[in-house]
Image: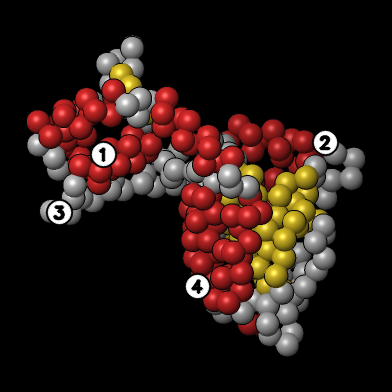
Amino acid sequence: MTESPQSPTVLGPGAGALDRGLAMLDHLATVRSCTTSDLARVLGLSRSTTYRLVDRLVKGGWLASDPATGNLRLGPSTARLAGAALGSVDLRSAAVPVIARLVRQTRETASLAVPNGLAMVFVHRERGPRPVAVTDEIGASRPFHSTSVGRAYLAALPDAQLDEQLDTLLRAADSPLHEGMIAELRATLERTRRRGWSEDRREFDESSCCCGAPVYDHTGRPIAAISVAGVAERMEHVMDDIGHLVAAAAAEVSAALGHARTAI
């Protein structure tokens, strides 16, 4: 899915040296490389302040100068800190509290699914509190092409990987897809990318509707999808509202895994 560049940290009038240094690191985590003058301009700092802080951050290993361009980039101290942070967070531990909040917000069933072979597999589900709610066992699988979790994952793939995945699906002996379905599926995935979340309106199950959004790891690779599913008569009138909640939840989990939103 196409994502918008992350806005730079806004520094208030009372920002101290620590706030300014962290803002520099945050900006470089998004743009990857820039000049010291760029930092001063984007963060609204004087050149003298910026050069003084950059010098301290370089000496501490938090920033480094790119040998090829002379531009600044994140340094080895940042990499060590990032590695320690990533090692302390896994997908399920990051997703479970967010999914629990989704259930409270929507009162519908929320789930976490990961790709496995030709399908998505639920690895965590929390049933909504309504008397009639969508339910299924952990470990249940869902096809890529006709479900919100599957479409969310496919739409998040870069075009080349999407082509490979669709080709694999078509060649599989037990594939639910045939060549005549690909054009419509691609159009659905493109709408999903533009909207920011996927939907399944009674397509997998006539009695339910679902919204989904992808979860990315620290490299920007989609690794899972979060969904909210409910009885169709309730869900089909509020899909836009719930879709935005699911997209925000997936983005929160992705951020916890180290994903920085950038333009693809």
Q: Residue at x 71, y 74 (%)?
A: 127
Residue at (37% x, 38% y) in the render: 30
Element class at badge 3: loop
Q: CA distance from mark 1 to mark 4?
A: 37 Å
Mark 3 to mark 1 CA distance (whole Å): 14 Å
- The alpha-carbon separation of the residues under discs 2 and 1 comes to 52 Å
How busy is the neighbourhood of tag 3: few (under 14 within 10 Å), some, or many (20 plus)?
few
- Residue at figure coordinates x 84%, y 45% from the top left: 175
Q: Secondary structure at mark 1?
A: helix
| Place of residue 167 in the rendered image (x, y in percent of width and height, measured from the top left) | 74, 35
Amino acid type of the residue that numbered disc 1 sits on in the rendered structure: Gly
Q: Which residue is mark 1?
A: 21
Q: Where in the figure is residue 177, as x and y percent of width and height?
A: 79, 47
Which circle marks residue 14 in the picture? 3
Decide which of tag 1 and tag 4 comes sooner along the chain: 1
Q: Is residue 260 left or right of residue 31?
A: right
Marks 2 and 1, the one that precedes in the sequence: 1
Evaluate if marks 1 and 4 touch, with contact meaning CB atoms under 8 Å apart.
Answer: no
Determine which quarter of the picture holds residue 101. Answer: bottom right
Residue beneath label 4, please? 241
Which residue is at the front of the view, 61 or 198? 61
Nearer to me, 65 or 139: 65
Tell me which label, 3 or 1, sits earlier in the chain. 3
| Position in image of residue 145 (x %, y %) | 72, 52
Tell which residue pokes out farthest to the top in this image: 68
As drawn, is 251 to the left or to the right of 225? left
Q: Nearer the viewer, mark 4 or mark 3?
A: 3
- Which type of secondary structure does the marked residue at label 2 adopt? helix
Other residues around mark 1 within 10 Å, as few (<14) / some (14–19) / many (≥20): some
